[in-house]
Image: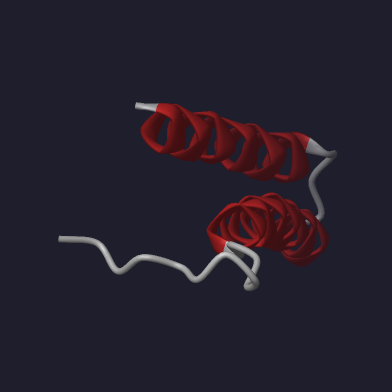
Amino acid sequence: MPEKIPPNRPDYSLLSKAWNIGIAIILLTLLGYWLDQKFHTTSIFTLMGASLGILYSLYEAWRALK
């Protein structure tokens, strides 16, 4: 059974999930940027990283609302 939060304490679970989603998008985008710099490519890896981050965030939002 989930632990009940007292009425005078806020629930930070949604804030935690928002941070996880935001950090995932930023880190995957930065990883893609780093790969673009390493392999001297155009922004293909950056776009792939951002896309993966967005897909992950949509999946996490779906799981949170389920």
The foreground one among 58 and 43 is 58
Looking at the rendered image, the quarter that the C terminus falls into is top left
Q: Is residue 20 above or below residue 21?
A: below
Q: Residue at x 54, y 30 (%)?
A: 55
Query: Residue 40, percent across and down?
Result: 81, 55
Decide if residue 10 is on the left or right side of residue 1.
right
Q: Which residue is drawn at 82% across and 62% down?
A: 37
> Which scheme is used to colour this image of the protein?
secondary structure
Query: Residue 30, percent across and down?
Result: 77, 61
Q: In this view, does 57 lie above or below 36?
A: above
Q: Which residue is drawn at 61% across and 43% down?
A: 53
Q: Which residue lies furthest to the left in this view?
A: 1
The foreground one among 62 and 32 is 62
How many labels, in total?
0
Q: In this view, does 11 lie above or below 29?
A: below
Decide if residue 46 is on the left or right side of residue 2.
right
Q: For residue 26, which quarter of the picture?
A: bottom right
Q: Residue at x 63, y 73 (%)?
A: 9
Looking at the rendered image, the quarter that the N terminus falls into is bottom left
The foreground one among 35 and 30 is 30
